[in-house]
Amino acid sequence: MSHLITRRTALGVGSAAILATLAACGSSKSNGSSGSQATVGTDAEVELTFAGWSLDTTPEFQALADAFTAANPNITITVKEYSAQDYDTQLTTDLSAGSAPDVFPIKNLLRYYYYMSNGQLMDLSDMAAGFDGDEAIDLTYLEYDSKYFALPYRQDSWLLFYNKDAFAQAGVEEPDGSWTWEDYKQAASKITAAGEMKGAYHHTWQSVVQGFALAQYPDADLTSGDYSYLKPFYETALEMQDSGDVETFATAQAQSLTYQAQFGTQKAAMMPMGSWFIATLLEQQSTGDADEFEWGLAPIPQYESGHEDAPITFGDPTSLAVNAALEGDKASAAKAFVAFATGEEGARAMAAIGITPAYFSETIESTFFDLDGMPQDDLSKLAFSTHDTRPENPVSETVNDIQTILNDTHSEIMTETTPVDEALSKAGEDIKGQGLTA
């Protein structure tokens, strides 16, 4: 269930191998070949469409398109905007109608099997082979039946954001990279007691509890039907909620609290959150939407100690897929764009705007930490670059339905309407009863 994605192993590994591979692919021009057999790259004039969401606040899509077309002026890319919240629903509708973009992101692994099994994704296994042996990128979780139908262009991992000023004011020692959840809970309690702000903020998503449990609890299995591994993580979350060290789930939900404001306006001193928040926080501090304070990154707390060399966290890759309906030069151009976006050149474009790319090298890390406002301490760099990231949604036919049931379970537990043991037992019974177990 796990695969080590330790970004530090990629540092110092040259990108020459992958660039050479992509260049070799790109030098072979298409002459009307179709689908997955199309080569990568074409001299023809081609217009592509590329899906994205919330373009005003999510600059990565246009940044990738602009960087690619600057290097490939014969190819034009138009970014088609979708709703961030309803992206999968809208994309599914367009795919069914035959009007979907030529290249589109797959947000996480939750719907990957659905798109793949419906024959809507071009087989990109030939391109995946070009990354063999390259430690700067990991394709593990996109493999299904020895094939790849998407390639990762960004890889967010969950980290601990913390307010250095709040720790100093409360006289609490900052994280040192070895924290367990018990250490985290105690630090939150001390900061809350100091009276300036709550010790932490836990957003309402099920992943804030369940993602860490699946990644960190020994032998946890999402498709087993046994969800007792979630219990200690829910006990910690409820203890912190009941003690007032985090805002209650009910309040956060009823008041539609945003995690950006809770941390950025210093309502809470710590927050487990995905690395995508880095770009948002930098932007909001520069515009005044977030307060000015010194912050840092730390490895996410662990269920068991002893993982300092590679702290276990979670995060699905965000990948790019090519519309299976494409043929000829259009298919070749689309594959060239995906090759660019998932390689080092695309990674540079992403890092320059504070987005965590899937392809990670020493150059990319330097680009990221050269951004104005980025913390410069060693722990922040370690937390960002070194971790064992495991999937929140292991690819399977039933993962979407299982997660839907577990989302309801999350609400029942966090609103304290159903005891933990009862809620987890019921979830297991429902999932087994619907034939969703492996």
Image (cartoon, helix red, strand yellow):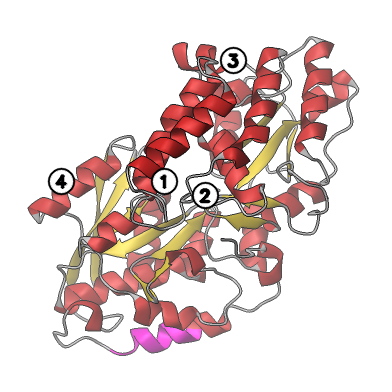
Q: Which residues are magenta?
A: 20-28
Indicate the amino acid at tag 2: Ile
Q: Nearer the viewer, residue 404 or 147?
A: 404
Q: Earlier in the sequence, mark 4 or mark 2?
A: 4
Q: For the point 52% across and 38% down, which residue is it?
A: 207
| Label 3 vs label 1, nearer the camera | 3
Q: For the point 52% across and 49% down, which residue is it?
A: 353
As drawn, 407 above or below 121: above
| Residue 414 in view here | yes
Q: Earlier in the sequence, mark 3 or mark 1?
A: 1
Q: Earlier in the sequence, mark 1 or mark 2?
A: 1
Q: Earlier in the sequence, mark 4 or mark 1?
A: 1
Q: Earlier in the sequence, mark 2 or mark 3?
A: 3
Residue 342 is left or right of residue 398, and the answer is: right
Asked where in the image residue 245 lies, by quadrant, the reply is top right
State yes or no: discs 1 and 2 in contact (Cβ < 8 Å).
Answer: yes
